[in-house]
């Protein structure tokens, strides 16, 4: 269990706050308080936002894989057309998860090797905290369009 003091020790670091805000640019940010989630939509605008939320007992931060012109305009009441107009891009996130952890590790390694073999340079891998890995490819790694379709419009 992560105590509030351990959480604050991490989230009060300026470098952590700045990287989190940088990563959250144009993304919806979801926060979790133990078993419940915070209000939606939300964003991180300033490094201090991270610390303020940690002081309110936030246990984790989650960003959307989609990038938005204005994440605060998101609503469950808007149409698909309106969502498509708000979306400016998306990051590819592959979630490798298997009951046998070693299989997850092998699969993640093979996927990353395959992506690099095909010329994808910007690949990130992180342990998901459970039985697998999240592999990320940023939107900038994709061409502007595929055929006659803008890549931003190919989500999901």
Image (spheres, grey):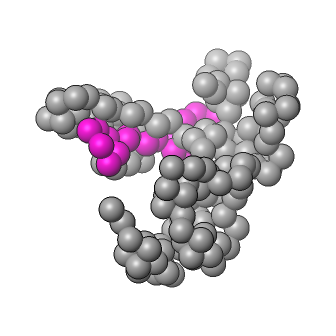
Q: In terms of image quadrants, where is residue 45?
A: bottom right
Residue 25 pos. (x, y %): 65, 58
* Magenta-colored stretch includes residue 138: yes
Question: In the picture provided, is 150 more to the left or to the right than 2?
Answer: right
Name the foreground residue: 145 vs 64.
64
Bounds of the magenta segment:
128-145
Residue at 17%, 30% in the rendered image: 100
Residue 8 pos. (x, y %): 46, 77
Question: In the picture provided, is 34 more to the left or to the right than 116?
Answer: right
> Is 107 situated above or below 62?
above
Disc count in the image? 0
Q: Residue furthest left?
A: 102
Residue 73 pos. (x, y %): 83, 46
Q: Residue furthest front?
A: 35
Q: Would residue 61 be seen by someone viewing this image from the given angle?
A: no
**Quarter in which the N terminus is drawn:** bottom left
Q: Would residue 39 be seen by someone viewing this image from the given angle?
A: yes
Q: In terms of image quadrants, where is residue 119?
A: top left
> Is 80 situated above or below 105?
above
Q: In terms of image quadrants, where is residue 3?
A: bottom left
* Magenta-colored stretch includes residue 39: no
Question: In the picture provided, is 61 more to the left or to the right than 10?
Answer: right
Question: In the picture provided, is 45 more to the left or to the right than 76?
Answer: left
Residue at 67%, 45% in the rendered image: 67
Residue 82 pos. (x, y %): 85, 31
Name the foreground residue: 80 vs 129.
129
Residue at 37%, 75% in the rendered image: 6
**Quarter in which the C terminus is drawn:** top right
> Is 45 situated above or below 36?
below
């Amino acid at each position: 269990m992560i105590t509030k003091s351990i959480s604050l020790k991490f989230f009060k670091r300026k470098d952590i706050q700045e990287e989190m805000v940088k990563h959250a640019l144009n993304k919806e940010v979801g926060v979790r308080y133990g078993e419940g989630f915070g209000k939606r939509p939300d964003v991180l605008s300033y490094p201090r936002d991270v610390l303020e939320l940690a002081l309110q007992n936030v246990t984790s931060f989650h960003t959307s894989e989609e990038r938005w012109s204005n994440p605060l305009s998101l609503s469950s009441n808007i149409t698909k057309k309106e969502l498509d107009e708000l979306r400016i891009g998306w990051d590819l996130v592959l979630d490798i998860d298997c009951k046998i952890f070693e299989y997850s590790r092998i699969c993640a390694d093979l996927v990353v090797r395959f992506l690099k073999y095909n010329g994808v340079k910007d690949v990130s891998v992180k342990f998901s905290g459970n039985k697998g890995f999240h592999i990320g490819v940023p939107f900038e790694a994709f061409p502007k369009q595929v055929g006659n379709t803008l890549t931003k419009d190919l989500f999901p």
